[in-house]
Image (spheres, grey):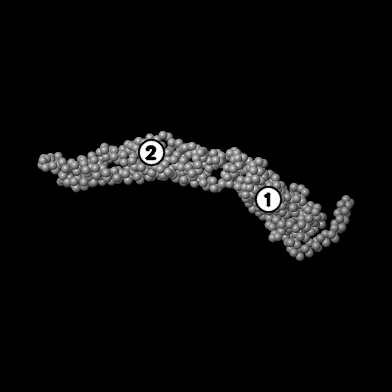
Amino acid sequence: MRHSARATLAAALLLPGLAMAQPSFEDCSALPEAQFRGAIERGTLAQFATAMPAADADALVARHWRALEMDALIQRLGREAHAQVAADAGYVRRLISNYSPGTASELARAFNARVYDNPEFKARFELLVAAIGDGLATRIATAGAAAQDEARRCVRGFLGGRYTATVAEAVLVTLRTNLAAPAGPAVDVATSTTINTARALSGAAVLVMRGALERIVERIVARSAGVIAGSLARRVVPVLGTALFAWDLVFGADGVLGEVEEQLTGDASREDIRDALAGSLREAAGREAAAAASRAADEVNRQWGEFRTQHIAVLALADKDPAFRAFLADVPPDRFGSLARLVDLLLKQGGEAAVQAAREDGTLGRATRLPEAGVAIALARGSLAEALAWADLAGANLPAVLRFEVFRSASPDQFTAESLARLLALEQPAAVAQLLRLDPALRGTLLRALPLDSLRTLAARLPTAPGAEPALATLARMLEALPAPEQANALVQALLRRPELIATLADEDTRRAVLVGSADPMAALEMLARQTALWDVMRMVADVQLAVDGTVSPRLLLQKYTAAGGVVAAVMLVLLLLVSRLLKPVFFVLRLLLPRARAR
């Protein structure tokens, strides 16, 4: 049955003069599944038949034959061949050719080689068949464009009645076979049956027409041999033989070459060549169009099968649940694939009841507007609700939530829209990852308190000791404890100068010494950040004075110089502190007496 349909429609391309009305795909809405493929094939082949009816093959050949002046070329080559063969044969052989079939045949074949094996003729013939092939390709591409709406109508009718127009349009979107893609460089050839068919027909037509020329020339040569043989037979009739021979001695010196030229290059022979080319064109078009229509139908049917297999659960639900089917009808076709994956997720988690609940509470409707990044998050987390929460929170930044995998380490309720936007604005995966490892409260402190540039730099430079809490967590604790913004800035500047200080501040007693034990936490931070050599006694004395005055905690002074110089530095500091304390009353009395002495 399938072969018979193809053969019937292909006959429109093969049978001369067969008229065919503008084809249309049949009504596909009531087709059973088994007949869907056949409907696509029949409609496609009908369009190809319309593109190249039998009469058009003759017109196409004639048009390009005239444009390339093939008649004039063949006639000129015939005259040149006549002169060349006559010169090569000589008077005696030409005269003998009037009576010898063998000699006549030799001259005819030499003439034929001078015309149809001539490089100039072959080059012009290649231009001819290429132009005809291109013309055929253009017609087929045009036919494909005409088939587009009809083919889509068939798909819409077949699938829309079963699964809603949304499913039908989604299938059309996924189809790589485009029955109507116009020929041009912007179209992917691998996905266009129309272009593939046009080029296949063009190539096949060129090959067939080349072979047709060889066959028709052989037939013309054979026919000319018969005509010449009849002429030779008349020359050997006994009654007239002597008179004809005498006539040929005077007037037949050209031998059979005149008849050969007429037979091989005359009007009838040129017409035979054109007819043979048109016939071969119809032959190629019929054969290739039938194969192309079959391939197109196979591709449409195959991809519908793949689509059905991929979305079998959703299609089955639409088939059995009228409410879900009605919901599906309002889904934009380009969102069907994403929705289908989310519905599959709900079915796996809670069955049809979960889908029903999501549809009734509006969750499924919101899911149809979820960007692809949100769909990916939902599938990765196994939660449509969480993906929707991320979408509400992040807005246009949702792709960045996916890119930095924020959803794997945090939940939407740990952020405000502003804090999430600032986190994503860091634009450095390492920095974002470090912040995501922090307690949400500490992470929020850093995002609120620090400029993004400083936060990026500190995230990259602050070291974390093995087994210790993250350096950024220590920084956040310090920022929470500092009462004024300028103090927080001083801390940041100190750490930018000496990132290793964060290890010191990781100790809770040290933080207490800075924040509680020092009258001026900023001075304490500056002292810790300032590098002082052991031989810089004046700087050391100044730091001691800060400790004596209570500006900074003595513990910080000891900690700084113990780290720098070990026991020696510690002993020197203790001595300086003792001396300072011993001399403190003396300095006090001097401050009281000096003004009085100056007054006298």
Residue 587 position (above or below residue 113): below
Label 2 crowd (10 A; few <14 / some 14-19 / many >=20): many
* Amino acid tagged 1: Ala
Q: Secondary structure at mark 2?
A: helix
Measure the C-alpha gap from mark 1 to mark 2.
68 Å
Q: Do we see residue 249 in this rendering?
A: no
Left/right of residue 342 with respect to residue 56 in the rendered view: right
Relative image position of residue 433 (x, y in whole percent): 65, 52
Residue at numbered disc 1 = 410
Q: Earlier in the sequence, mark 1 or mark 2?
A: 2
Residue at (24, 40) in percent of width and height = 263
Residue at (57, 45) in percent of width and height = 316
Left/right of residue 581 with respect to residue 161 in the rendered view: right
Residue 586 position (above or below residue 47): below
Name the one closer to the observer, 85 or 383: 383
Relative image position of residue 423 (x, y in whole percent): 67, 48
Relative image position of residue 58 (x, y in whole percent): 34, 37
**How many tags in the picture?**
2
Point out which mark residue 363 bears. Answer: none
Residue at (66, 54) in percent of width and height = 460
* Amino acid tagged 2: Ala
Relative image position of residue 429 (x, y in whole percent): 63, 51
Residue at numbered disc 2 = 12
Q: Quadrant of the N terminus?
A: top left
Q: Residue furthest bottom?
A: 567
Residue at (72, 54) in percent of width and height = 473
Q: Do we see residue 279 in this rendering?
A: yes
Name the one closer to the observer, 261 or 8: 8
Name the one closer to the observer, 307 or 81: 307
Q: Secondary structure at mark 1?
A: loop
